[in-house]
């Protein structure tokens, strides 16, 4: 798969249904998604979390991060992100621009929690984090999900954490 430099792209929907895109490792010039403000990342493949880390790194002006798992994409949404390789350094967008996190079909699995906690801990200007919890898929109680995220460290003192139960 070939991705070209798109310095003026402001909004992107990335749907990981092919493992080809998972080979993406950024570009040498470092400004692939320099103007990207809104990223909607559908994570339906096992290595999607690595792509998330790279896209955060390559999107220094990102304001809205929308993570979702969509049923009926020909993949098993239970796979999703199975491992989270935390970036070696905090991406610029978390330090300077990310204001909104929306996570649809949050399962509360360890890898999901690791990513959510990492974002909450490092997003200095986060205003809202809305988590749509899916407790049916992985038998993680809604209350347990809420407690774990509510008690996690948040760098942004103005961040509002909103938890909504996802209804199938």
Image (spheres, rainbow, N blue to C red):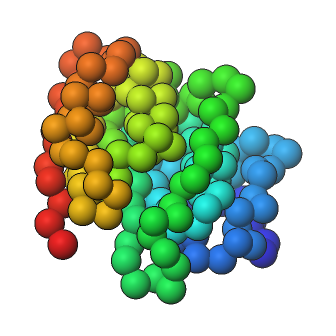
Q: Residue at x 23, y 36 (%)?
A: 144
Residue 89, quarter of the rendered image: top right
Horizontally, residue 44 falls left or right of residue 130, namely right
Above or below, comparing residue 119 to residue 77 in the picture: above
Above or below, comparing residue 146 to residue 69 in the picture: above
Q: In this view of the protein, can residue 125 be seen by the observer?
A: no
Looking at the picture, how far across and down is residue 47, in whole percent?
Answer: 65, 58
Q: Residue at x 85, y 45 (%)?
A: 28
Residue 8, quarter of the rendered image: bottom right
Tell me the quarter of the image containing the C terminus: bottom left
Q: Seen from this angle, which residue lies furthest front?
A: 139
Horizontally, residue 64 falls left or right of residue 54, namely left
Tell me the quarter of the image containing the N terminus: bottom right
Q: Residue at x 61, y 47 (%)?
A: 83
Looking at the picture, how far across and down is residue 79, in whole percent?
Answer: 53, 64
Looking at the picture, how far across and down is residue 94, in whole percent?
Answer: 48, 29
Along the line of sight, which residue is nearer the eye, 35 or 22?
22
Along the line of sight, which residue is nearer the eye, 88 or 138?
138
Along the line of sight, which residue is nearer the eye, 62 or 20?
20
Q: Seen from this angle, which residue lies furthest right?
A: 28
Q: In this view of the protein, can residue 18 be seen by the observer?
A: yes
Looking at the picture, how far across and down is residue 158, in whole percent?
Answer: 21, 19
Horizontally, residue 120 falls left or right of residue 42, namely left
């Amino acid at each position: 798969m070939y991705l070209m430099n798109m310095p003026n792209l402001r909004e992107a929907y990335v749907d990981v249904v092919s493992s080809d895109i998972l080979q993406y490792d950024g570009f040498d010039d470092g400004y692939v998604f320099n103007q990207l403000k809104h990223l909607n990342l559908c994570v339906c493949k096992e290595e999607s979390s690595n792509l998330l880390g790279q896209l955060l790194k390559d999107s220094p002006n990102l304001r809205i991060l929308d993570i979702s798992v969509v049923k009926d994409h020909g993949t098993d949404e239970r796979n999703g992100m199975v491992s989270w390789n935390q970036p070696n350094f905090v991406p610029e967008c978390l330090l300077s621009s990310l204001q909104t996190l929306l996570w649809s079909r949050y399962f509360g699995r360890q890898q999901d929690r690791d990513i959510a906690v990492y974002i909450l801990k490092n997003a200095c200007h986060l205003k809202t984090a809305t988590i749509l919890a899916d407790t049916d898929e992985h038998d993680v109680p809604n209350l347990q999900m809420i407690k774990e995220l509510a008690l996690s460290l948040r760098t942004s003192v103005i961040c509002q954490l909103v938890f909504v139960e996802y209804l199938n």
